[in-house]
Image: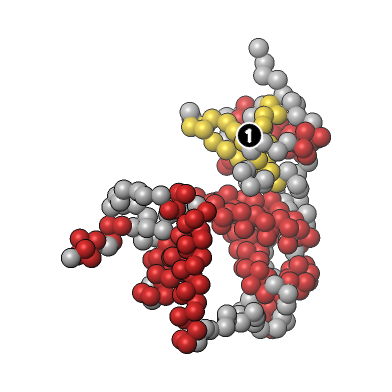
Amino acid sequence: MARKINRLNAQAVGTITKHGRHADGGGLYLSISPNGGRRWVFLFRWHGKPTEIGFGSARDVTLARARELGAQARAKLAEGINPKDVRRPTEGVTFGECADRVIEAIRPSWRNSKHAAQWEMTLRDYAAALRRLPVDKITTDDVLSVLKPLWNEKPETAFRLRGRIERVLDAAKSQGLRSGENPARWRGHLDQILPKRQRLTRGHHAAMGYNGLPAFIADLQERQATAARGDAAASAPFRLRRGDPVFRHPGHSALALEFAILTAARSGEVLGASWDEFDLDRLRQ
C-alpha cells in the first residue's frame, strides 16, 4: 500500500504545538522544537543511513513550497542521486533559510539548550525584517534597519544580533549564495556608522560599607530561620552523604549568601559546593 501524502493542512501547520516531528507524508515533516521553533525537514535513507535535509522555517516556507521541495528530493532519489548533494540555486534562498541552517549546523556544539533558544529568538524576532529577503540581496541599510532600533535601548542584544547576522551572511557566502563584503561586519564598516557600544549601561550595584555588614548578616540569619520554619524539607534532619550539595533547598539561599560573604568564595563555588569538600571530622575536633 502506498504511503499517504499531504496529511497536513495550512491550519494545522499554524496551530500544532506539540514538539516533535509531524508527518505530511513522502518523507516531509514539520519539526517543532521544545522551545517552539518550527521548521520543515525531509527524511530519507541513503545507503542505509538515515539522512535529513532542512527546508527552512515554517514561518518563511509555506506548506505548498515545502511539498514542492519534498517532491524534488524524491525525484532525485528516484534517479539515484542524493538530494543533499544537489546544490540549491542561489536565487530565492532567503536569509531566514540560511539562518536556520546555521543554527542547525552549530547546534551540536552548544552544551546548553539556552544558546539555541537565544539564537533562534534573536534571528526570528529581532531580525524578522531580514528573514524573507533573498540572502544575496541584503545590504548595509537592511542590516542597520534591524540594529538601530536596539542599538541604544538594548546595546548588548544589538551587538550579539549583529554578530549572528554576520555569521549567517558569512556562511551564505561560503556556500556560494552571496558575494562581496559582509554588510554586518563591525571592524572597518559598521563601526564607522554606529556609535561605539556602551558597556555596563546600568552600572554596578552599589557596594555595602563594612560597617553595615553586622546588621545585614543578622537579617540574613533571621531570613534563614524564617525559611526553615516554613520549609520542612530545609529544616528536617538529614543524613550527610559526601557527594550531596550543601545548599540543596530553596530555603538555603540566605545561608549560601552568608557563607559567600564569610569566605569570599565565588558564587559558582558556593552554589556547587558539596559535602565532600568540607573536612567535617576536623571541624568536630
Q: Can residue 76 be seen in this view?
A: no
Q: Is residue 226 left or right of residue 72?
A: left
- Image position, residue 67 (x, y; %): 74, 34
User: At x 73% / y 43%, what residue is drawn?
Assistant: 58
Asked which quadrant contains residue 176, the reply is: bottom right
User: At x 45% / y 80%, what residue is drawn?
Assistant: 214
Q: How many marks?
A: 1
Front-most of residues 155 and 40: 155
- Image position, residue 75 (x, y; %): 67, 30
User: At x 78% / y 39%, what residue is drawn?
Assistant: 14
Q: Is residue 184 above or below residue 247?
A: below
Asked which quadrant contains residue 27, the reply is: top right
Disc 1 target residue: 21
Front-most of residues 200 and 122: 200
Q: Is residue 217 visible?
A: yes
- Image position, residue 161 (x, y; %): 66, 66
User: At x 63% / y 47%, what residue is drawn?
Assistant: 35
Seen as rendered, the residue at the extreme right is 11
Report helix, strand or loop for mark 1.
strand
Mark 1: amino acid: Arg
The quadrant the C terminus occupies is bottom left
- Image position, residue 186 (x, y; %): 63, 76
Seen as rendered, the residue at the extreme top is 1
Q: How crowded is mark 1: few (under 14 residues within 10 Å), some or many (20 or more)?
A: some
